Amino acid sequence: MNTRMRRAAFAFCATAMAASLAACGSAKESGDKSDGGTKTAKGDDITVGLLLPENQTARYEKFDKPIIEKQISELTNGKGKVEYLNAKQDATLQSQQIDTMITKNVDVLILDAVDYKAVAQGVKKAKEDGIPVVAYDRLAEGPISAYTSFDNEEVGKTQGEALLKALGAKAKSGKVVMMNGSVTDPNAAQFKKGAHDVLDGKVSIGKEYDTKEWKPENANANMQGAISSLGKDKIVGVYSANDGMAGGIITALKGAGLKTLPPVTGQDAELAGVQRIVAGEQYMSVFKSYPQEAETVAKMAVSIAKTGKVDGSLKTTTVDSGTEKGVPAVIVPVVSLTKDNIKDTVVKEGYYTVGDICTGKYKAACDKIGLK
């Protein structure tokens, strides 16, 4: 019997001694698992804990949080409640936040990990207390109940293929700089692997960095180092794992006096990244349907909180997370975003309007590519 249910059962037995043995016995038989599994089926009145990793990347506050909250409300007829905390890229703080969610007795926890290894103990504690954990966007170690994200190796391959296309015959005429994400994020390793699968043997990688905390300023410093080491005229392309870092990279390239920028990749379809694509400063980004991912995790969490199982209407595969094997997972597809398909991706999906993108200094560039 898990910790939370033991407390509930003890309180009940203390107030009804005559019926205690029958009541306590039935509590265990009716769904309280000795391995820390979920409780009996619940109705719409559930509490979902939501832990997001940081607020520097625009997506979390702009897309993930409001979409998850809206979907959970719709799936619970307005009765479901969301308890939200953001770790601000602090793994220690996120571990404390998991403890907070356990104390609040949430019915299920959606967790986007700052550090996928550091959360393992918290995930274990949550399960022991009867709280299933759904890993969101980043696979977390520990006994998670489900997972949803994008095909992260495919993201890296998409970026690598786009860079090769942009380079064309220049692919081996100079050096490519690789700006990978943070080593604490398991997705970053998968992006890197996918990109290497495509680029290795086809380009000459002059410098490669794992960028601390995904911060644009760290990518900027790394890029300045690469320019100093390789020479600005020797760099033919830059693999950047996301849009935020691409901004820091492009600032460094401009600061070095480059008039014509090499192609730079990205990911996340951030507004600033899309505008740089329009302006010809950034070659591409990876469009990922955060609404689809967020709606999926909400559906997973509500279903698990209510029934202990993933919603049967979701198309699932399985993944392994550390010692946890065969975790139910939903993998959302990705799209290469360039100036040619902005209208069919971020505009069509409602991320931004043409007015959002084509502000003052981008108006002429938008007109040039037919974005009106």
Image: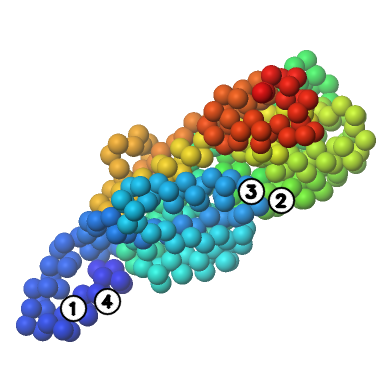
| Residue 202 x/y as whole percent | 71, 22
Judging depth in this view, the residue of 225 and 246 nearest the camera is 246
Q: Of label 3 and label 1, which has the lower sequence position?
A: 1
Instruction: Please rate how many residues cluster around mark 4, counting C-alpha atoms within 10 Å: few if below 14, some from 14 to 19, many from 20.
Output: few
| Residue 63 x/y as whole percent | 54, 45
How many numbered discs?
A: 4
Q: Quadrant location of the N terminus?
A: bottom left
Q: How far apart are the alpha carbons under marks 4 and 2? A: 44 Å
Q: Are marks 1 and 4 in contact (CB under 8 Å)?
A: no
Q: Residue at x 57, y 55 (%)?
A: 53
Look at the image and name its color scheme.
rainbow
Residue 304 left/right relative to 122: left
| Residue 174 x/y as whole percent | 84, 26
Q: How far apart are the alpha carbons under marks 4 and 3? A: 40 Å
- Amino acid type of disc 1? Phe
* Residue corresponding to mark 3: 57
Q: How far apart are the alpha carbons under marks 2 and 3? A: 9 Å
- Amino acid type of disc 4? Arg
Residue lying farthest to the left in this orientation? 18
Residue 115 left/right relative to 259: left
Q: How far apart are the alpha carbons under marks 3 and 1? A: 47 Å
* Residue corresponding to mark 2: 215
Q: Residue at x 73, y 39 (%)?
A: 246
Which of the numbered marks, if any, corresponds to residue 7? Answer: 4
Q: Secondary structure at mark 2?
A: loop
Judging depth in this view, the residue of 99 and 202 nearest the camera is 99
Residue 237 is at least partly visible in this image: no
Instruction: Please rate how many residues cluster around mark 2, counting C-alpha atoms within 10 Å: few if below 14, some from 14 to 19, many from 20.
Output: some
From this view, report whether residue 333 is shown above or below residue 59: above
Instruction: Please rate how many residues cluster around mark 3, counting C-alpha atoms within 10 Å: few if below 14, some from 14 to 19, many from 20.
Output: some
